[in-house]
Amino acid sequence: MLNTIAAFDRIGEENAFAVLARATALAAQGRDIINLGIGQPDFRTPEHIVEAAIKALKDGHHGYTPATGILPLREAVAADLHKRYGVSVSPDEVMIMPGGKPTMFMSILMFGEPGAEILYPDPGFPIYRSMIEFTGAKPVPIPIREENGFAFSAEETLGLITDKTRLIIINSPANPTGGVTPKAEVDKFVAGLEKWPNVAVMSDEIYDQMTYDGEKHVCLLSYPSIRDRLILLNGWSKTYAMTGWRLGYAVFPGKLYDYARKLAVNLHSCVNAPTQFAGLAALTGPQDAVRAMVAEFDKRRKVVVEGLNKLEGVSCIMPKGAFYAFPNIKKTGWKAKPLANALLDETGVALIGGPDFGVLGEGYLRLSYANSTENIVKALGRMGDFLAKRKAAE
Ligand code: PLP
């Protein structure tokens, strides 16, 4: 039952926002804070995208748009998916959303109910579990393991499916680990799903353009056998440094599309019009800013990982995607959340404790390297001094 206070009491949060608020408050008190906590690019939205929004406002795009988004934008999304992955998607399957989160919100609402089971990655984006619990469904964690390069295991995931499973959430490249699941593993996963025709999949591909070392993103839309039960989540937030604009899209199959359209009509009516024009400019305009940003993240990724591996008791595998490092801190003797708190209070470095992403996140920290190399190096220095001192004091 959704409309009970108990359901609302089960809604979780995203601690990255709480850490951001705390870091901002400390900075306002004059503390020198380096924020490696929040998952958003430290770049400005490219100028031509900003200009397109200004132009849309000046041209008088001030009213409602269709709930599913303006047609040119839905067409541009379909064309972009075709160009990048060779998949054919109709603009009528594309729905423009106010960010990536509403797609997970709606999808989990569609499938979650008491008695149902929903599989989700642990550690993983905290909103998955929060929303599953809200619906009264049983959250079933898919363990995401360091020894597996933080990829999900097809065999393990398939082994968790029961006749109560309604939805499986997967996320690659992944938050918080930076893990990328290789194509062979995704192939195995999709093949195994043939035995479970009633199980839907939501693939969160918000970091699809952020892969490194020549790793090619595998878009789940490329598997015809699950197209009729696949929901794709993607958006502009990360790729085009547009987190504050609130712009995302979903590809919904069959009648789920109409359910989502109705939910949108009930919830937000439509995404604000100038933002949709900005999104159109992003997809149809030059992509060099995206490439430059990813190249910069790639450089920082190496600095972060190399630096983390030099810290006392810390080890970190090289993430293959997104802009997060997920170092193992088990040998420091600290639990993750107390360490994250102590690092913020005592050294001014904001980062997130792994348990904020699920129970299997214990023993890890998440660092977002969406910050300058200079700040990253400074933060690693402070962390190193802190850990060495704390060790010496023991
Ligand atoms: N999915 C994942 C895995 C994310 O990390 C995030 C944001 O951090 C989102 C979805 C939500 O994106 P948006 O800000 O567009 O709602």
Image (cartoon, helix red, strand yellow):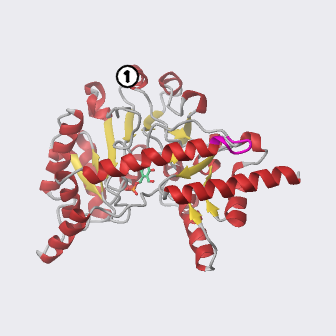
Region rendered in magenta? 309-314
Frontmost residue, 332 versus 302: 302
Quick one: 246 or 213, which is closer to the camera? 213
Task: Name the residue nearer the viewer: 113 or 220.
Answer: 220
* Res. 2 visible in picture: yes
> Would residue 387 appear left or right of 129 to someone viewing this image?
right
Residue lying furthest bottom in this view?
Answer: 29
User: Image point 56% across, 51% down: which residue?
Assistant: 367
Secondary structure beneath label 1: helix
Magenta residues, dominant SS class: loop
**Does the magenta-highlighted stretch encompass residue 342?**
no
Q: Amino acid at mark 1?
A: Asp
Percent of width and height locating residue 339: 72, 54
121 up-or-down from 63: above or below = above
Please say whether residue 118 is visible from this viewpoint: no
Residue 252: quarter of image:
top left
Mark 1 C-beta closer than 8 Å to ligand 1: no
Residue at 81 percent of width and 54 percent of height: 390
**Mark 1 lies on residue:** 187
Residue 187 is situated, as x and y percent measured from the top left of the image, at 37, 22
Establish if 276 lies above or below 388. Answer: below
Name the spot of residue 148 as percent of width and height, x first: 55, 28
Residue 173 x/y as whole percent? 43, 39
Give the residue at x 18% y 57%. Answer: 280
Residue 64 placement: quadrant: bottom left
Q: Residue at x 17, y 35 (%)?
A: 88
Residue at far right of view: 394
Label 1 crowd bin: few (<14), some (14–19), many (20+), radius 10 Å: some
Per the image, is 311 magenta?
Answer: yes
